[in-house]
Amino acid sequence: MSDTSRLERLVAAAVRAPSSHNTQPWIFEAEGGALRLLADRTRALPVNDPEDRELTISCGCALFNLRAAAAAEGLGARVTLLPEDDDPDLLAVVSLEGAADGRLAALARQIEGRRTFRKAFAARPPAEEVHAALAAAAEAEGAWLDPVEQPERRAALADLVEEGDAAQWADPRWRRELAAWMHPRRQGDGLSLPGIAVPLARFAVRRVDLGERVGAHDGDLAKAAPMLVVLGTGGDEEADWLAAGQALERVLLAAAEAGLQASYLNQPVQVPELRTKLRALLRPEGAPQTVLRIGYPSSDAAEAPRRPVEAVFAG
């Protein structure tokens, strides 16, 4: 089997990573026996993510999937982050060499089954050893995972989620950006809707401030989540965002291995003043990067659409 076929398989696994608004903001290039990961800033969200922090985290998730898929092929993956100062889009170079990591190979089996589960979870709480395993997964990638368990802290975080919804939906620019990423499923990216519903949904989102309604719903999801956690890093630079993305995907795959799925309540890290409040709620010295609710899915969830490999890979 050709090297090109193998690289295509690795990229196909990498692009199953989650991304904000399902923008899939990545490009892969073959370079000898290595793969280059570049940020596709044409798919950025300048209102929701003005510093490309979440874009970079999304690329970090794809990078972890690539490492895990390589391990499943019996390959090691030596990663060089941010290798060229004069190319800000080049986020990583992955050289396929050395011994495979058995733990990553095991996690690779969960890539296809990982989903973003947006409904209410089953009431059954995960066991304590699951909490410990997910925290260890984050730490293995240089990040931290803080549980939000005490009722008063959980209520405070739910309030931040509701405040974030109110702030975002009150901004017409944010609503226009959200509407622009509502796509029919056949397009392969974005927030997937039945094709016939897209024009009406876009019109409603652009014109109507749904912040109070959405905020109440999201606040309830936060309060009821079997696990409510915040993933963060020690610093808040581009390398930290890549570490956060790799840690996030490792946590998500470890959760899927335990039968769990997750979804995001990232409003408190997307609105700057709320991120400051969230930091104070958790650990003042850290940088919160994403808020997750985790639990056992109460029903099946469809996989988000993906663009074909040839759209993101230059072999």
Image: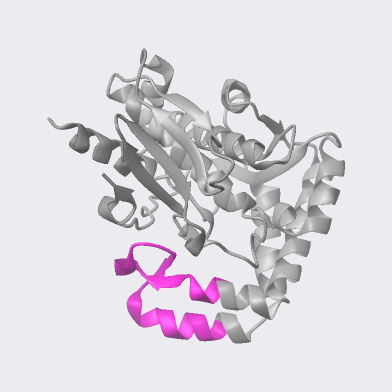
The quarter of the picture where the C terminus appears is: top left
Q: Does residue 294 appear anywhere in the picture?
A: yes
The correct choice, above or below, for 48 with respect to 198 in the image is: above
Query: For residue 186: magenta?
Result: yes
- Picture quadrant of residue 10: top left
Q: Residue furthest front?
A: 86
Residue under the point 63% across and 24% down? 139
Image x and y of residue 156, in percent: 82, 50
Residue under the point 59% across and 83% down? 206
- Picture quadrant of residue 109: top left
> Of 267 and 1, which appears nearest the observer?
1
Image x and y of residue 276, in percent: 84, 50
> Of 283 and 194, which appears nearest the observer?
283
The quarter of the picture where the N terminus appears is: top left
Residue under the point 64% across and 26% down? 142
Q: Is residue 74 left or right of residue 79?
A: left
Q: Does residue 261 appear anywhere in the picture?
A: no
Query: For residue 83: magenta?
Result: no
Q: Which residues are magenta?
A: 178-204
